[in-house]
Image (tube, rainbow, N blue to C red):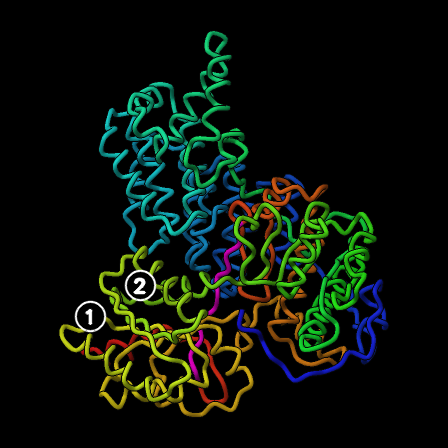
């Protein structure tokens, strides 16, 4: 990854085992504590829910969700809680309305498996006709996420089978699966179909079974339909033995994005919204140990110090709430750091880090992931590791691209230029952007590379790119996966060629440079946007708490790294796992909720995705994108 670089600062000393509120972990004194405050309206509703008073929870959540003065974050949380309570109270119409409100106040919520499972559960209790109408409406809704629409398409297809409409729906399922963005989305679709088939009536299932042949049985949706048939047959006395043998044989032959589907019952794949209504910052009583694996000397010592400081604030909050929490920071620059991980107390089932790839490889070689759930602060893990060997607690390159494409597709942009340096990073990002853009419906993409070491080549390459776009306006946005310092040379070339209309799409490399401030040359960047992880201009309530506590302790202001430590410590303390097996951790992650300070992370089958913020260059650095103003400028440019 392109590293975040800060001025080199040495840590005076860090004590390995330390209470979070102790003075030995941080320079400049202890982190202050504050008295526990009364419950907020949202927390009161959540407490009613957790205690089993679903009627009161629904009433309180409805009141808050309907309050026009409530902030969007509270309204989103209230709508989510209202949906959970309404499902408990058998009020599906209320739940569906609440899910719409959740999505409206938290755009992108419908891309999460928790939202989708709640929607499917609500629709499941409606009449067959009403369920089909709602599923068809969501499937065709242009303003909804593709994962939500795909989920609705599966729900619709299975219900169509009851009416004998098999061929058309099977073709639609094949199309949905073929359009899925990557293995994670394909696995989610397989699990959804498995659950819907499991709950379908025998007549609909029997019709689907008739479509499975020797030629198609290894492809979606037929592979999942075959698994359902074999699983049903294994429950009947006359076919049990042969079906169990066939299930075992099929497990190794079916081309599934989620191979575990052959071994798990469909109920195990469903995520219940109520399982995540507790707040991660307030787990049940009991000691918590938050462990971090960080380099405490060398180039990344300043980063490590910030992560540890944020984790300390989180532990201090937990202690203030009556939950005993300890922070352990293990220096991966020390030769015995792996042994020190093994010496952690049993309560340290999760560890945050490592921060560096070589340390992650060292942790694997020492067998640490077999004993503890490792949440690496890395943008990617080794192939096949994520959700099985370890977990990611950091944005991936794909998260950056998803944020950009989510933005441009709302503007109706379907054509893209990709202008990239011919180095490993540039080529990798260019290929990823092209793949995801085509999956999102891009019609035209022009790719142009340039020699990163030869500035004379940059202008020639720019001319080639724009010449290819001169007739018919093939693309209206250009992806620029290069450092910010090179933009001062590259972007003016567009203007020299009288191209001032393009939406300029940067990466988080821009955030790293612009975070230092001082940028004033905004004349070229009125239509520029890039993804980021920490919104200092509009912090979340959790981010505001972090800022206030760091300031009270006399420490540097909050930034992404301190927020990363703060959020990890609260998630770690609230995960409530009894072992570090992949199934236990994956199930816990999918039912966990957290009031994030950084861009929110969610996990689907152990695969992390982060819903990144969007920014634009501005005087002094950068600012959150005002989408309405951006749209007006874009439409004016293309008149």
Please determine whether, in this image, residue 443 is positioned above or below residue 255.
below
Please state if 450 lies on the left or on the right of 245 as rendered. left
Q: Nearer the viewer, residue 215 or 519?
A: 215
**Residue that mark 1 sits on:** 474
Q: Which residues are magenta?
A: 607-617
Rendered-image quadrant of the N terminus: bottom right
- At mark 1, the secondary structure is loop
Give me the residue at 50% from left, 18% from top: 244
**Residue that mark 2 sits on:** 409
Q: Does 134 appear in magenta? A: no
Identify the residue at the far left of this view: 471
Q: Position of residue 369 (x, y in %)?
A: 68, 49
Q: Is residue 322 visible?
A: no
Q: Quadrant of residue 339?
A: bottom right
Give me the residue at 74% from left, 78% from top: 552
Number of numbered tags placed on the structure image: 2
Q: Position of residue 560 (x, y in %)?
A: 60, 72
Please state if 451 lies on the left or on the right of 350 as rendered. left
Please state if 506 lies on the left or on the right of 632 as rendered. right
Query: Magenta segment, principal secondary structure?
Result: strand
Mark 2 or 1 closer to N-term?
2
Q: Nearer the viewer, residue 430 or 229?
A: 430
Q: Nearer the viewer, residue 486 or 398?
A: 486
Q: Position of residue 204 (x, y in %)?
A: 33, 23
């Amino acid at each position: 990854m392109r590293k975040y670089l800060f001025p080199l600062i040495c840590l005076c000393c860090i004590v390995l085992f330390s209470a979070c509120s102790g003075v030995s972990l941080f320079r400049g004194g202890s982190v202050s504590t504050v008295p526990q405050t009364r419950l907020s309206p949202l927390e009161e509703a959540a407490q009613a829910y957790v205690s089993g008073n679903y009627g009161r929870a629904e009433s309180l959540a409805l009141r808050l969700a309907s309050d026009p003065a409530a902030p969007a974050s509270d309204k989103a949380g209230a709508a989510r809680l209202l949906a959970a309570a309404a499902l408990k109270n058998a009020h599906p119409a209320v739940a569906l309305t609440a899910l719409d409100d959740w999505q409206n106040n938290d755009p992108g919520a419908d891309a999460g498996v928790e939202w989708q499972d709640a929607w499917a559960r609500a629709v499941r209790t409606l009449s067959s006709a009403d369920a089909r109408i709602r599923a068809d409406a969501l499937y065709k809704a242009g303003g909804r996420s593709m994962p939500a629409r795909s989920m609705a398409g599966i729900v619709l297809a299975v219900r169509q089978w009851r009416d004998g409409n098999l061929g058309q729906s099977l073709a639609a399922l094949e199309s949905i699966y073929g359009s899925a963005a990557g293995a994670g989305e394909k696995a989610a679709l397989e699990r959804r179909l498995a659950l819907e088939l499991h709950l379908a009536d025998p007549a609909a299932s029997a019709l689907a079974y008739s479509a499975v042949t020797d030629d198609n049985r290894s492809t979606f949706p037929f592979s999942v339909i075959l698994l359902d048939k074999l699983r049903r047959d294994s429950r009947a006395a006359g076919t049990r033995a042969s079906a169990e043998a066939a299930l075992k044989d099929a497990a190794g032959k079916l081309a599934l994005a989620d191979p575990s589907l052959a071994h798990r019952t469909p109920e195990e794949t469903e995520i219940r919204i109520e399982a995540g209504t507790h707040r991660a910052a307030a787990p049940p009583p009991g000691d918590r140990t938050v462990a971090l694996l960080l380099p405490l000397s060398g180039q990344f010592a300043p980063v490590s110090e910030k992560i540890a400081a944020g984790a300390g604030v989180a532990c201090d909050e937990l202690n203030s709430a009556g939950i005993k929490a300890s922070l352990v920071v293990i220096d991966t620059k020390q030769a015995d750091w792996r042994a020190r991980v093994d010496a952690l107390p049993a309560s340290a089932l999760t560890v945050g880090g490592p921060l560096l790839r070589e340390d992650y490889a060292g942790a694997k070689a020492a067998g640490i992931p077999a004993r503890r759930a490792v949440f690496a602060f890395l943008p990617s893990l080794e192939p096949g590791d994520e959700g099985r060997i370890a977990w990611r607690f950091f944005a991936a390159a794909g998260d950056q691209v998803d944020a950009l494409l989510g933005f441009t597709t709302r503007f109706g942009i379907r054509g893209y230029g990709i202008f990239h340096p011919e180095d490993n990073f540039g080529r990798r990002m260019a290929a990823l952007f092209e793949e995801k853009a085509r999956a999102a419906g891009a019609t035209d993409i022009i790719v142009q590379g340039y020699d990163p070491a030869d500035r004379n080549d940059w202008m020639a390459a720019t001319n080639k790119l724009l010449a290819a776009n001169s007739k018919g306006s093939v693309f209206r946005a250009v992806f620029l996966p290069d450092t910010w310092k090179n933009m001062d040379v590259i972007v003016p070339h567009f203007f020299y060629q009288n191209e001032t209309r393009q939406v300029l799409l940067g990466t988080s490399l821009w955030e790293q440079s612009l975070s230092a401030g001082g940028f004033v040359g905004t004349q070229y960047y009125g239509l520029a946007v890039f993804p980021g992880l920490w919104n200092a201009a509009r912090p979340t309530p959790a981010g505001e708490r972090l800022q206030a506590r760091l300031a009270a302790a006399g420490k540097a202001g909050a930034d992404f790294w301190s927020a990363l430590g703060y959020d990890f410590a609260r998630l770690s303390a609230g995960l409530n796992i009894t072992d570090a097996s992949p199934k236990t951790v994956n199930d816990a992650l999918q039912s966990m909720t957290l009031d994030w300070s950084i861009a929110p992370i969610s996990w689907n089958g152990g695969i992390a995705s982060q819903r990144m913020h969007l920014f634009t260059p501005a005087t002094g650095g950068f600012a959150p994108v005002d989408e309405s103003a951006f749209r007006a400028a874009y439409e004016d440019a293309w008149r």
